[in-house]
Amino acid sequence: MRSHLRDLLGLVAFVLIAGGAAGLLHEWLGWFHLFGFLRFLALDGYEIYSYLVLIALGFGLGAAGDAVRRDR
């Protein structure tokens, strides 16, 4: 069970970190559209902050996945 939770947290962390970084690149460069579905989570007018929060949340979930791994 813990292995599945660890894998799920790792996957979600990767999607949030990569999606947040791709969103920042899209805001700054205007052409990068990887993980575009995460743009629906960004608040209008606060896109940069929203993507930074997604990245921070991804790192937090990644740390939680590592904590599950160490708990064994």
Image: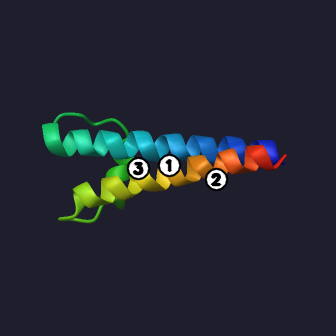
The amino acid marked with disc number 1 is Phe
Q: Residue at x 33, y 54 (%)?
A: 52
Which mark is on residue 59?
1
Q: Earlier in the sequence, mark 1 or mark 2?
A: 1
Q: Are there few (<14), some (14-19), or many (20+) residues within 10 Å of tag 3?
A: many
Q: In this orientation, does residue 30 appear?
A: no
**Residue 54, position in %: x, y?**
40, 54
Q: Residues within 10 Å of mark 2 (few under 14, many from 20)?
A: some
Q: Residue at x 66, y 47 (%)?
A: 65
Distance, label 3 to label 2, CA atoms, is 14 Å
First in sequence: mark 3 or mark 2? 3
Mark 1 and 2 residues: CB-CB less than 8 Å, in contact?
no
Q: Is residue 59 left or right of residue 19?
A: right
Q: Which residue is mark 2?
A: 64
Q: Residues at badges 1 and 3 in contact (C-beta under 8 Å)?
A: yes
Badge 2 element: helix
User: Residue 31: x percent and y percent?
Assistant: 17, 34
* Horizontal relation, residue 70 to residue 47: left or right: right
Q: Label 3 sits on what residue type?
A: Ile
Helix, strand or loop for disc 1: helix
Q: Which residue is mark 3?
A: 55
Residue type indicated by callout 2: Ala
User: Which residue does the image show at 22% across and 41% down from the upper left?
Assistant: 26
Taking 29 as reference, is 70 above or below it?
Answer: below
Residue 38: x %, y % from top left: 38, 51
Where does residue 68 sit, x and y in percent of width and height?
Answer: 74, 50
- On the question of residue 39 being in view, the answer is yes
Between the C-alphas of marks 1 and 3, the distance is 6 Å
Work out whether residue 32 or residue 28 is closer to the camera in this orientation and state it: 28
Q: Residue furthest left?
A: 29
